[in-house]
Amino acid sequence: MTDLIASVDAESDFIPAAKPLIGTDERRAVDGVLASGMLAQGAEVAAFEREFGATLVDDHDAVAVNSGTSALHLALLAAGVGPEDEVIVPSFTFAATANAVALVGASPVFVDIDPDTYCMSPAAVRAAITSRTAAVMPVHLYGHPADMTAIGALASSHGLAVVEDAAQAHGARWRGRAVGTFGIAGAFSLYPTKNMTAGEGGMITVDDANLDRLLRLYRNQGMERRYENEVVGFNLRMSELHAAIGRVQLRKVLGWTAQRQANAAYLSREITTIETPVTAPCAEHVFHQYVVRVPEDRDGFARALELEYGVGSGVYYPTPVHRLPSFDLDLDLPETERAAREVLALPVYPSLTKRQLDRVVRGVEALSRAGA
Ligand SMILES: *Cc1c(COP(=O)(O)O)cnc(C)c1O
């Protein structure tokens, strides 16, 4: 790696594909918790939940857990999804979406995506509904909201629960309404590479007091009062240390999002030789990833971008979830397959400088011209 970086021209340090921003205020917050000696779920977690609800999901309730995957898992459990049920999910996503379905004993039914937004196609959802369908899980992939108008209409006419996978979409909106507020529950991730982090962690957003209570029971051994376990539950609690980091990040996430959007607008203006991201007219895209399509030899393109220009990039995701050994289904999802071959995520995170953005543009333009 050192050799590769050294071979890049002198102006340049390597530009990674993603970069978590941790400041002295996050460190100070963690130190404060350590000094207090109160480390397990308590006042910091409760404050983080309130602030998350107010900042990102139009004052819906938020329940903190230890990961985005736990958030999805508990949301499905609390929605009563279980064995015999089918849940419609996109295959072009991180495996956690479908894992959560399988972990409650239900069957994920994989559908294709809209090639413009990379989110699940409402027409494909309609075609996949059966008498066993219990829920649909739109994923707001890359920070672009799924078509919640069409998916919401299908869900209400067929009596399906909607559980939103908003792991990549903190603050994204569809027709002005925050993701995480459309279904019976939304699930957010606070993993280090997401738009904000708590170190690790997740949030479930709900707008129903019974569901809220059930989620709180499930995350803590089924107890509201100690040693009075009401249901069988897990330990999926968030620690005070993680909540303290998350609270500091929450104060910055809206500004970071604006910077991601500005970076994305700059890249889309300057990149002219390759297909740049599409934003639906009624969507607010928060650019967790800035994804272009490279139709020929995407992996060679990514390698050259790194070696010749010192620009990192990422492929999310190279294998559709239905083809992973964990599911291994032979399905025909052509837009999912094409996206898995073509997508390439370029750096878009808020701390990029104009010089770095210009180097990304220069590399992409030169390589796509050379390949054309
Ligand atoms: C990150 C992610 C998850 C899982 O979140 P973790 O916090 O890593 O468990 C689920 N779905 C999608 C789409 C994700 O990107």
Image (tube, rainbow, N blue to C red):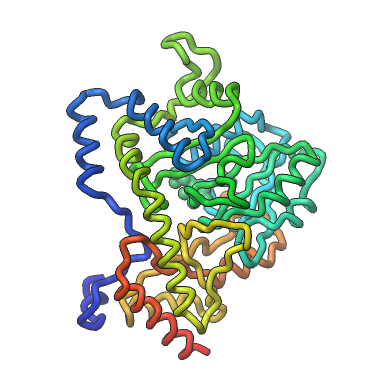
Q: Is residue 38 above or below residue 75?
A: above
**Image coordinates for residue 61, horizontal then vertical, percent:** 51, 31
- Choose between 73 and 28: the one closer to the eye: 28
Q: Is residue 185 visible in this depiction of the protein?
A: yes
Whether residue 323 is visible here, answered yes or no, is no
Q: Compared to 218, does 1 lie above or below?
A: below
In the shown orientation, is residue 110 left or right of residue 275? right
Point 51% across, 21% down: residue: 217
Q: Residue furthest left?
A: 35
Total number of numbered labels?
0
Residue 311 image position (x, y, % from top left): 34, 73
Q: Nearer the viewer, residue 245 or 333?
A: 245
User: In the image, is residue 166 above or below residue 364?
Assistant: above
Q: Position of residue 212 (x, y in %)?
A: 55, 25
Q: Position of residue 329 (x, y in %)?
A: 67, 54
Q: Residue at x 51, y 72 (%)?
A: 292
Q: Residue at x 49, y 24 (%)?
A: 216
Examine the image and state in which quarter residue 237 appears. Answer: top left
Q: Is residue 42 above or below residue 304?
A: above
The quarter of the picture where the N terminus appears is bottom left
The answer to whether residue 33 is left or right of residue 187 is left
Dividing the picture into quarters, in which one does residue 181 lie?
A: top right
Residue at (41, 11) in percent of width and height: 226
Q: Residue furthest front?
A: 176
- Which residue of the protein is positioned furthest toward the top in this rendering? 228
